[in-house]
């Protein structure tokens, strides 16, 4: 029993920092955002339905200057969808596929 508990604790100690790093991408800007990450995901997926591959909160020109950026895959297509973090407006919806013919 002690070995199993020790293994579980060790495994959690190794994986929790990775999960936390993923969850807080863009953390320095989070206090400035008026739209939550969950709300921005919903807006982005309504704009381009699919599976989110990457998401981040970043400062960038356009809109309020703070935006959520999502890479979304649907089939072979990958779109980048940008959502203004203060207003919820779509700032970008562009084909980001690497192998577009």
Image: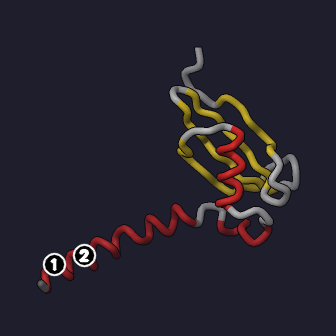
Pointer 1: what residue?
4
Q: Quadrant of residue 14?
A: bottom left
Using the image, determine if residue 47 lies above or below residue 89.
above
Using the image, determine if residue 30 lies above or below residue 68.
below
Task: Count neighbours of disc 1 (C-alpha within 10 A) and say few if under 14, some if 14 to 19, many if 20 or more.
Answer: few
Instruction: Tell me: 5 left or right of 51.
Output: left
Mark drawn on residue 45: none
**Cα–Cα gap, marks 2 and 1:** 6 Å
- Residue 83 position, x and y percent, is 76, 49
Location of the N terminus (image quadrant): bottom left
Mark drawn on residue 8: 2
Instruction: Tell me: 60 left or right of 70.
Output: right
Front in this rendered view, residue 85 or 58: 85
Q: Looking at the image, which residue is at 28% across and 79% down?
A: 9
- In the picture as drawn, the residue positioned furthest to the bottom comes out as 2
Using the image, determine if residue 101 lies above or below residue 73.
above
Location of the C terminus (image quadrant): top right
- Residue 4 position, x and y percent, is 16, 78
């Amino acid at each position: 029993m002690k070995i199993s508990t020790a293994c579980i604790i060790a495994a959690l100690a190794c994986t929790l920092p990775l999960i936390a790093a993923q969850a807080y991408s863009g953390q320095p800007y989070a206090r400035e955002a008026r739209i939550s990450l969950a709300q921005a995901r919903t807006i982005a997926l309504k704009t381009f339905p699919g599976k989110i591959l990457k998401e981040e909160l970043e400062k960038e020109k356009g809109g309020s200057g703070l935006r959520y950026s999502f890479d979304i895959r649907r089939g072979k297509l990958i779109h980048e969808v940008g959502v203004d973090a203060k207003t919820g407006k779509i700032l970008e919806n562009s084909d980001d596929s690497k192998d577009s013919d």
